[in-house]
Image (cartoon, rainbow, N blue to C red):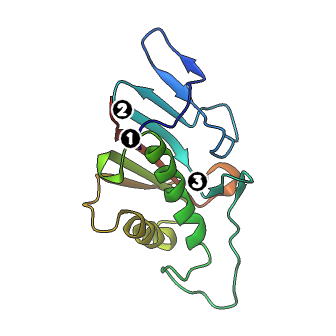
């Protein structure tokens, strides 16, 4: 696929390149979506935000709690966080098998960890899973439920 990230917004004297591609959702604060140095791509915490609208994927509550499965009303938002990550790494010319590390932040471990596991299985398929930490936090930006931070090896 090759590098489709476009030109960096900034390049430091040490060769650190910062990117916030226009086809990705707009950052909600003072950060870049990713940085690159050499053949390593560091992706900021991505959430379940639609790139087209820069809005969180809605969680449509139902009368019945579907539990920790792909049927959960929160699952589309969790899945979108991983899909956003996949979109970025593929644009950089990498694949999911090139993941060096994942860090997942969630606001409710018992409720959302199973959804994170399901989303990761859906995105990765049969590829071996990368090292991952999952951390429960008291709050995320915009009162979100999950954020995925990652590091990938990419073609030089």
Q: Where is residue 63 in the image (x, y as percent from the top left)?
A: 70, 90
The local secondary structure at tag 2 comes to strand
Q: How crowded is mark 2: few (under 14 residues within 10 Å), some or many (20 or more)?
A: some
Q: Residues within 10 Å of mark 1 (few under 14, many from 20)?
A: many
Camera-near label (2 vs 3) is 2
From this viewpoint, which residue is outermost toward the front? 1
Kindly indicate the quadrant of the structure image that contains residue 75.
bottom right
Q: Distance between the residues labelled 3 and 1?
A: 15 Å
Frontmost residue, 136 versus 127: 127
The first of marks 2 and 3 along the sequence is 2
Label 1, secondary structure: give it.
strand
Q: Quadrant of the N terminus?
A: top left
Element marked by disc 3: loop
- Which residue is nearer to you in this view: 67 or 86? 86
**Which residue was labeled with disc 1?**
151
> Hey, which residue is sitting farthest bottom in the picture?
64
Across and down, in percent, residue 54 comes to: 72, 51
Residue contact at pointers 2 and 1, CB within 8 angstroms: yes
**Dot 3 corresponds to which residue?**
47
Q: Nearer the viewer, residue 126 or 72?
A: 126
Q: Considering only vertical position in the picture, is 58 above or below 34?
A: below
Picture residue at 27% right of the left edge, 62% below the top: 127
**Quadrant of the rendering where the C terminus is positioned:** top left
Which sits in the foreground, 64 or 33?
33
Q: What separation in Å lies between label 2 and label 3 (alpha carbons)?
A: 21 Å
Q: Position of residue 11 (x, y in %)?
A: 52, 16
At a point 29% along the width and 53% down the height, the residue shown is 130
């Amino acid at each position: 696929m090759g590098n489709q990230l476009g030109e960096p917004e900034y390049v430091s004297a040490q060769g650190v390149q910062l990117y916030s591609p226009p086809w990705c959702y707009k950052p909600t604060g003072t950060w870049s979506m990713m940085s690159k140095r050499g053949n390593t791509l560091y992706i900021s915490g991505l959430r379940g935000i639609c790139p087209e609208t820069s809005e969180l994927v809605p969680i449509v509550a139902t009368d019945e709690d579907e539990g920790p499965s792909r049927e959960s009303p929160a699952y589309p938002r969790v899945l979108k966080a991983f899909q956003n990550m996949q979109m970025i790494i593929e644009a950089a010319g990498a694949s999911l098998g090139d993941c060096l590390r994942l860090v997942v932040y969630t606001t409710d471990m018992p409720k959302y960890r199973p959804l994170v596991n399901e989303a990761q299985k859906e995105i990765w398929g049969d590829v071996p899973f990368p090292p991952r930490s999952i951390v429960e936090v008291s709050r995320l930006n915009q009162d979100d439920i999950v954020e995925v931070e990652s590091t990938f090896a990419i073609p030089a």
